[in-house]
C-alpha cells in the first residue's frame, strides 16, 4: 500500500503528511519516510505529552 500510494502522488508537490490518531500514524509515517517528507502526528487535545498548539 505504501508503494502504491507513493507512486500515485510522486508527481504532486506535498509538503508534509499529517496522520490522525493511530491508523494515520501506521500508514502516514512509512509513506512520509518513503516520500522523504515530514510527518505530523495529530491527536485529540489532552492525549499528547506536552503543550498543544
Image: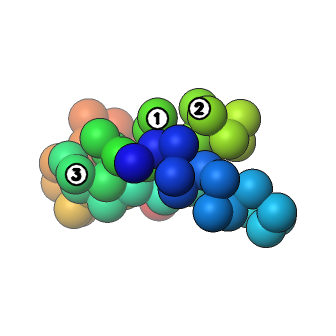
Residue shown at 26% from the left, 35% from the top: 49
Going from the N terminus, do you reach mark 2 or mark 3 first? 3
8 vs 43, nearest the viewer: 8
Instruction: Classify residue 38 by image quadrant.
Output: top right
Determine crowd level at label 2: few under 14, some 14-19, many 20+ residues with C-alpha closer than 10 A: few
Q: Is residue 33 above or below residue 3?
A: above
Q: Would you call the spot at circle 3 few (<14 residues within 10 Å), some (14-19), or many (20 or more)? A: few
Crowdedness of circle 1 by 10 Å Cα count: few (<14), some, many (20+)?
A: some
Residue under the point 67% across and 62% down = 9
Cα gap from disc 2 to disc 3, whole angstroms: 16 Å
Q: Which residue is mark 2?
A: 33
- Marks 2,1: beta carbons within 8 A: yes
Q: Is residue 20 above or below residue 39?
A: below
**Could you say whether the residue bearing mark 3 is in a helix, strand or loop?**
helix
Q: Position of residue 1 (x, y in %)?
A: 39, 48
Q: Position of residue 12 (x, y in %)?
A: 79, 67
Spatial CA distance of label 2 from label 1 is 5 Å
Residue pictured at 52% horizontal, 56% vertical = 5
User: Which residue is tagged 3?
Assistant: 23
Q: CA distance from mark 3 to mark 1?
A: 12 Å
Q: Is residue 32 visible?
A: yes
Q: Which x, y percent locates residue 4?
A: 51, 52
Q: Residue furthest bottom?
A: 12
Which residue corresponds to mark 1?
30
Q: Which comes before the other along the chain, label 3 or label 1?
A: 3
Q: Secondary structure at mark 2?
A: helix
Q: Looking at the picture, how far across and down is residue 36, in whole percent?
A: 71, 35
Amino acid at each position: 500500500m505504501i508503494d502504491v500510494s507513493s507512486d500515485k502522488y510522486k508527481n504532486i508537490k506535498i509538503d508534509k503528511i499529517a496522520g490522525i490518531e493511530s491508523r494515520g500514524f501506521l500508514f502516514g509515517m512509512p509513506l512520509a519516510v518513503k516520500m522523504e517528507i515530514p510527518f505530523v502526528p495529530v491527536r485529540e487535545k489532552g492525549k499528547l505529552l506536552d503543550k498543544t498548539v
